[in-house]
Image (cartoon, rainbow, N blue to C red):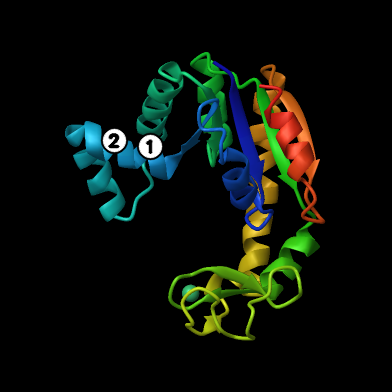
Amino acid sequence: MSTIVLTGKNGAGKDTRLDKFMKGREDRFQVLAMSNLLRKVRETDPELWERIDAIMKAGDLVPDDIILSIVAKELESATKTVICNGFPRTAAQAAAMVAMGHVPDAVVELHVDDEVVVQRAKDRIICSKCKKPYTLNDFNPPKVEGVCDDCGAPLVKRDDDEESIVRKRLAQYNEQTPPILKTLIEAGAEFHKIDNNAHSAEDSFKNVMCMY
Ligand SMILES: [Zn+2]
């Protein structure tokens, strides 16, 4: 089965793009995300879940060996092209993935410039109740200013859209990502960088993903 590692800055529109892409394609692709995997562990492996739960409740990160064993199991049992979203998170995880023989077929980076991410965060508002996102510009405005289309609750800024927090996250991504990509590409993964600066990546994203 093919494996694709999908990466992109927080705010690059990765999850939105992926959600749209997956509609109607569930028979050919499956998404591997840590949140889904942990949910699966909770449902199928209570013993392991107990360990993980204790670690997370203590505020610690789940260690790589546990994460990697869960991911490996998932990749080995896959019957569709797997899109890894949010994994590997570190160069060590990438190296371990390669060492286990799970070299991804492709690494796809949905790219937006830092300044575009900062501007999108400035423009973003969300519903205080149902969390539906809107923009202050005319990309995705609410029908009535300051009010949610769906539930009528007031729209607010998200705390983590604060510029200093956004810039800190960007710095983290820009530092952590190149070594991850380097490890996977050197191991043989094909690299695709897709420009999403103008929210225009829909076709190129689809074309690249469907190669695998
Ligand atoms: Zn709402």
Secondary structure of the residue carrying numbered label 1: helix
Give the class, few, some or many, for how many residues have Cα within 10 Å of label 1's Cα (few <14, many ≥20): some
Q: Measuring from the top left, give residue 153's x and y in whole percent.
A: 47, 83
Residue at the disc numbered 2: 41
Q: On residue 136, which mark appears? A: none
User: Where 60 sits versus 181, above or below?
Assistant: below
Query: Is 49 left or right of 126, judged from the image as shown?
Result: left
**Which is more toward the observer, 160 or 167?**
160
140 lies above or below 203: below
Image height of 91 relative to 123, above or below:
above
Residue at label 1?
37
Q: Residues within 10 Å of mark 2 (few under 14, many from 20)?
A: some
Q: For the residue marked with disc 1, what is the amino acid? A: Leu
Label 2 is placed on what type of residue?
Val
At x 45%, y 20%, the residue is 78
Image coords of residue 212 (percent x, y): 66, 21
- For the image shown, how many numbered marks are present on the structure? 2
87 lies above or below 137: above
Q: Residue at x 71, y 20 (%)?
A: 186
Q: Ligand 1: does it lie within 8 Å of the C-beta at label 2?
A: no
Quick one: SS at disc 2?
helix
Q: CA distance from mark 1 to mark 2?
A: 6 Å
Estimate the x, y position of residue 100 in percent, counting from the top left.
Answer: 48, 16
Q: Residue at x 64, y 66 (%)?
A: 166
Nearest the eye: 192 or 206: 206
Is residue 126 left or right of 109 when viewed as pictured? left
Q: Quadrant of the N terminus?
A: top right
Q: Position of residue 53 (x, y in %)?
A: 25, 46
Image-based side of 51 in relation to 40, left or right: left
Q: Could you tell me if the residues under marks 1 and 2 are in contact, i.e. CB atoms within 8 Å?
A: yes
Residue 120 position by quadrant? bottom right
